Image (cartoon, helix red, strand yellow):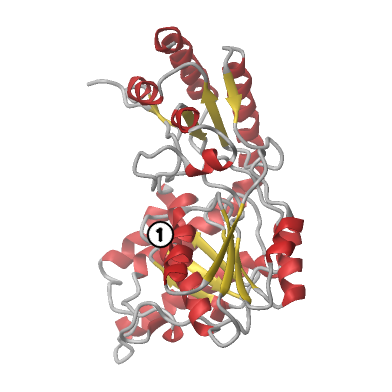
Amino acid sequence: MAAAPIYLDHQASTPCDPAVVAAMAPWWTEGAANPSSRGHRPGLAAAAAVEVARGRLAQALAVPPEGVVFTSGATEADNLAIKGLCEARLERGRHLVTVATEHRAVLEPCRYLERLGFGLTVLPVGPDGLLDPDRLAAALRPDTVLVSVMAANNEIGVLQPLAAIGALCGRHGVAFHCDGAQLVGQAPLRPLELGIDLLSLSGHKFGGPQGIGALVLAPGVTVAPQLHGGGHEGGRRSGTLPLPLIVGLAEALDRALADAPARGARLLRLRERLRLGLEALGGITVNGALDPRLPHNLNVTVQGVDGGRLHRELRRWLAVSGGSACSSGAPSHVLQALGLSREAAAASLRFGLGRGTGEADIDQALAVVSRLLPALR
């Protein structure tokens, strides 16, 4: 059997931590009662486990527990935040602002609202991928109700100036939504201290299970539900709560934050080893600012090659991507927003390092690219 490709796509999804799997295990079987069934002891135990997990997330993010709304992941959380906030504040205005490099889980809900008659401003970024807060300030209008800017870009890893954006939105009475899927679990993030009113997160980005995430709301912020039914989660998100996944989400976040400083420092060293090795091959350039940036992200363009062939040849040896896992193979809209052509964007690689990445993986990845590059050019 051929050896498995070296997995360097941790920004798309991370392996579930074995300790998280173990924490979830009892709740799939003997603890499998519905948390909404409060008329018997198993149901009450399930409901209590949900609230313990909610409290753990709230403590990790320094927010009140009642502000944590469980969702199926960051995509649902983004939709609930954007559509739910705008629907809840219809009387205040119908204008929202976002950024060209956002994940499609943000851009598409915004465009949906635009088709319904909302005004939408999509701001550009600089060649480094960063938003200029002054440009955001100039885009705000009296009828602006929401600004949505992600914490860390899912393709190029750059970190947006959240404190400046939060302060600006606060001064203008505009709600600030932040897709935090790539940053939560990688570094301490306290949304209320940054002026973030709505924060989206997803468990499988930091060693948790797929299919679970949350929307975190600041005190006083309300959203109109986008899923109607039994009125779960305080009427904000109907649907039976996936108890094992919720337990796993809380366990994963606690474990991720516990080793985040050491992990970040180690992955930064590996990332730089990879970057320097790739640049030494010639004709390989980094996309986006190196600082501020997630330590485990590297996005590069390989010049002089066909993008489709590049990815086909690498696929046997390396599990890397050309952009977001949700891009359906199209050239990255993020890289094109930085000024790259469609051809250059297609010939780009995103390396996402993770907890299991070691020096041997980096050296093997460099050897693969070095071996294939002459033929590709």
Residue extending furthest toward the bottom: 39
Q: Position of residue 22 (x, y in %)?
A: 38, 55
Residue extending furthest toward the top: 374
Quadrant into which the C terminus falls:
top left
Q: Position of residue 317 (x, y in %)?
A: 36, 22
- Quadrant in the rendering for residue 359: top right
Q: Residues within 10 Å of mark 1 (few under 14, many from 20)?
A: some
Q: Identify the residue at image location x=61%, y=40%.
A: 263
Location of residue 366 with respect to 248 vertically, above or below: above
Which residue in the protein does label 1 denote? Answer: 23
Numbered disc 1: secondary structure: helix
Q: Nearer the viewer, residue 166 or 201?
A: 166
Horizontal relation, residue 210 to residue 114: left or right? left
Amino acid at pointer 1 = Ala
Q: Nearer the viewer, residue 182 or 102?
A: 102
Horizontal relation, residue 289 to residue 327: left or right? right
Q: Identify the residue at image location x=60%, y=71%.
A: 146
Q: Position of residue 321 (x, y in %)?
A: 42, 34
Q: How many marks?
A: 1
Quadrant into which the N terminus falls:
top left
Q: Is residue 183 visible?
A: yes
Q: Position of residue 130 (x, y in %)?
A: 67, 46
Q: Identify the residue at image location x=58%, y=37%.
A: 296
